[in-house]
Amino acid sequence: MNDPTVVKAALRCLVSLEKGPATVIDISRDSGVALEDCHGLLSLLYRAGLVELRSQGEFGLMQPLAEMSVLDILDAVWETWIDRSAVTMLFGFSTSAASLAVGDSQRS
């Protein structure tokens, strides 16, 4: 999967979960994301704290999708899939470089 496809697939899985808790099979079917990809994305979203695993193998949103940060979603799926953070992808530098730049500008 390329980067835009990964993000679109993750968003389709999250949108599917807005309807309520569901199994990976149900989310895959509803979102149109291949079962293997859906499982991988849900694992990443779970590790990022955006979804939870409920009873009987159902996933659910930790908070309403409208309250989730786009950056949190990007970090959850892009960092692992292409080995760089969303901040780097969006701004071309890491968060540590950003903090250094802010520190330098405050000293001037």
Image: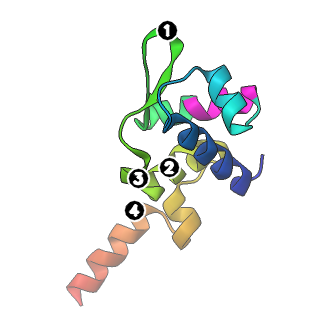
Which quarter of the picture shows residue 51? top left
What segment carries the magenta color? 35-42
Give the residue type at disc 2. Answer: Ile
Residue 92 location, x and y as percent? 56, 71
Q: In the rendered image, is residue 99 in sight?
A: yes
- Residue bearing the label numbered 3: 66
- Residue bearing the label numbered 4: 96
Check whether the beta carbons of the residues at disc 4 and disc 1 lie within 8 A of each other.
no
Of callouts 2 and 3, the N-terminal one: 3
Which quarter of the picture shows residue 60? top left
Of callouts 4 and 1, the N-terminal one: 1
The answer for how far apart the CA atoms under marks 3 and 1 are is: 26 Å
Of callouts 3 and 1, the N-terminal one: 1
- Residue bearing the label numbered 2: 73
Vertical arrangement, residue 38 with respect to residue 66, above or below: above
Which quarter of the picture shows residue 95? bottom left
